[in-house]
Amino acid sequence: MSTPCDRCGNAEAAIHFTQIQNNETTTRHLCEACAAALGLDPGAGATAPLADFLAQMGKAVAGETVTTAGTCPACGLSLADFKRTGRLGCARCWAVFEPSLKGLLRKLHGGTQHVGKVYLPADPTAVDRTARVTSLRRSLQRAVDEEDFERAAALRDQIRRLETQV
């Protein structure tokens, strides 16, 4: 369902923004014409805050020596373009702009090396046990299909022992 423009009431709202002033939240819905009349740039929308933030960070990083080339040889992106848009052009940009990006990342995140989270099961032997039970179930099914009931009974007992372990 479309939302009408809060200002003119005729056109469909294309820009939705929330403003907080004096602990009061106001949400406005504007068509592109009304947004332009109020001086809001519809094209800047989502990237403006990031671009402004990066520009501010870039000023702090500007004192550091930049040993990279002016533009990425793969995509042609310049460091100024990155600061304006907040986006790199390609994977090679990381290598080309590394000194500047490291300084920016250090200021943003406090470090330049990613230390992610790795899932570690509560009991590493539980994973081994589960894999073993799965394998034994396949063997059990083959033994039943081949009508080798003695081997099937032995496999069933092994599965029960593994499943009862805590």
Image (cartoon, grey):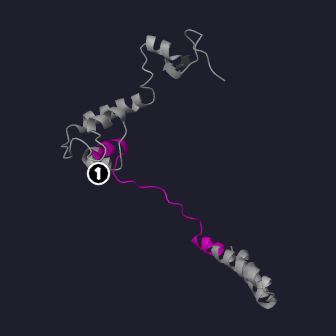
- Looking at the figure, which quarter contains the N terminus? top right
Please give left or right for residue 3 compared with residue 92 in the image: right
The type of residue carrying mark 1 is Ala
Task: State the image coordinates of residue 78 (x, y, percent, origin top left).
Answer: 27, 38
- Mark 1 — residue? 95
The magenta-colored residue range is 101-130
Q: In what element is the residue under mark 1?
A: helix
In the rendered image, the vertical position of residue 93 relative to residue 115, given as above or below = above
Whether residue 117 is in magenta: the answer is yes
Q: Quadrant of residue 157?
A: bottom right
- Looking at the figure, which quarter contains the C terminus? bottom right
Q: Decide: few, some or many residues near mark 1? Use Cα within 10 Å; few <14, some 14-19, many ≥20.
A: few
Task: State the image coordinates of residue 156 (x, y, percent, origin top left).
Answer: 77, 82
Task: State the image coordinates of residue 3 (x, y, percent, origin top left).
Answer: 62, 19
Name which residue lies at 63% across and 21% down.
2
Name which residue lies at 41% across and 31% down.
47
Please give left or right for residue 27 compared with residue 65 in the image: right
